[in-house]
Image (cartoon, rainbow, N blue to C red):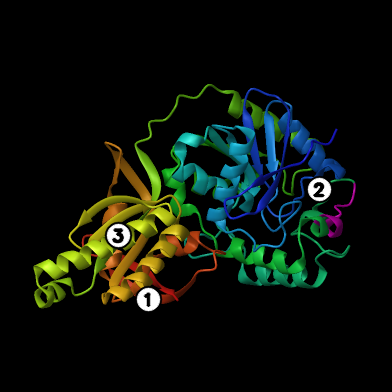
Amino acid sequence: MIPETHYAKTPDGVYIAYQTLGDGPIDIVWQFEWMGNVDTIWEYRPFAEWFRGLASFSRLILHDRRGTGASSRNVAPADLETRVTDLKVVLEAVGSEQPVLGGALDGGAANVLFAASDPQRVHSLFWWYPTARVTRAPDYPYGSSPEILQRFRQDTAEHWGTDTYRFGDWQSSGADTEAVPWGWLSRQTATPDVALEMAWIADATDVRAAMPAITAPVLLLARERDRETLEYLATLLRQPQIRLFPGEDVLKIHEQFAVLDAIREFVGIELAAPELDTILSTVLFTDVVGSTQKQAAMGDHRWKGLIEEHHAIVRDALGRWRGLESDTAGDGFYATFDGPARAIRCAIEITQRVMALGIEIRAGVHTGECELMDGKISGITVSIGARVAAQAIASEVLVSQTVKDLVAGSGLAFEDAGEHDLKGVPGPWRLYRVAD
């Protein structure tokens, strides 16, 4: 039986197609990693068996990313932050309060951001073939080389939607006795231009900086050959578990049941609720450039009126972009956000609007693990955010490397601002200015 498809409407008017299957004691949300269409996945036996296996001990929740599948296709592909926001809309629609988050490959990246930034909403996570970063880097030798990624993009551009299309090495590995219909699956997912944009977003994303803030248990699953990768990723997590399976190629269909058993055992264990003493958060710092000189030139009374107008603009922008005001000192603001793209857009808006007052601000944005003390956010992340802002010049928004990595696909553009020594923070820091 194929589940009935429903729609959840996002605040920006996008329709997200979703399904639920099963009536188990827990909710499992599965994030499609690359291809997916909630209506047609059931026509391909391996996918159908996998999802019915998950639904055998849970209420399974599936949804298509915006721009793909049965969801609205007349919109741009979702960046990481938007995927989290859209998932929350689906969870609200189905009444899921604390689901288990599951995914494979880069499909698990959005789960990382969700679990790190909203820990009270997440029971646990499992990640099949975890891909915290697609591209190889000096500190991440487990990614794909530029040559492989280029071949993949070329194949996508030239063969997407045809029977000659191949996704990675699955086809040659003998993943199943029946041929994998990549042409049909790709056509049901998206058009080639959208597929290429999704590939670019995945290649530019790196969620490693968010992983230490996850307080929930995380199960990492892969082949024995991937032990080194999983052991490295486990060092970034607080409550990691690893399950490795024998063999060298992609799991064959009859082996899926061993993976399902591992997941069932993992989510069936009664886990103590973690203390929410930390949370992944994005911090924004702003202050008026040359404020002392302007105050001296204007006089205290006129300056007071100007600052009140400045504060009104900042608070209006914070409300629009869902920022929380944490502190105000003189002409400076410190605010927090649950998503880095919103923090950047808020900073851009403030920068542009205060020009009408005859003043300019500088702004800095950083994302990291923050401590919760009496309901307020503190810690080294806050200090780094303040130091990033201090490096900015008039009407400039600077962000850290972590922020840039997390907003791939958001439509924001950046220029390299070089390496900087941040006062009191070890090591050089690569910063980027937001391009208008």
Q: Identify the residue at image location x=56%, y=23%.
A: 269
Image coordinates of residue 52 in percent, x first then y, are 77, 33
Q: Nearer the viewer, residue 117 or 247?
A: 117
- Residue on which the image places disc 3: 312
Residue 318 occupies quadrant: bottom left
Q: Identify the residue at image location x=46%, y=44%.
A: 116
In space, the residues marked 1 and 2 are separated at their CA atoms by 46 Å
Residue 181, magenta (yes or no): yes
- Residue on which the image places disc 1: 417
What type is the residue that disc 3 sits on?
Ala
Above or below 272: residue 32: below
Left or right: residue 114 versus residue 267 is left
Q: Identify the residue at image location x=13%, y=75%.
A: 298
N-term-proximal mark, 3 vs 1: 3
N-term-proximal mark, 1 vs 2: 2
Q: Which residues are magenta?
A: 178-185
Quadrant containing the C terminus is: bottom left
Mark 3 crowd level (few <14, some 14–19, many ≥20, 10 Å Cα): few
Image coordinates of residue 175 in percent, x first then y, are 81, 48
Q: Identify the residue at image location x=36%, y=62%.
A: 365
Give the foreground label among 1 and 2: 1
Image coordinates of residue 86 in percent, x first then y, are 59, 49
In space, the residues marked 3 and 1 are separated at their CA atoms by 30 Å
Q: Nearer the viewer, residue 83 or 221?
A: 83
- Residue on which the image places disc 2: 175
What type is the residue that disc 2 sits on?
Ala
Q: Secondary structure at mark 3?
A: helix
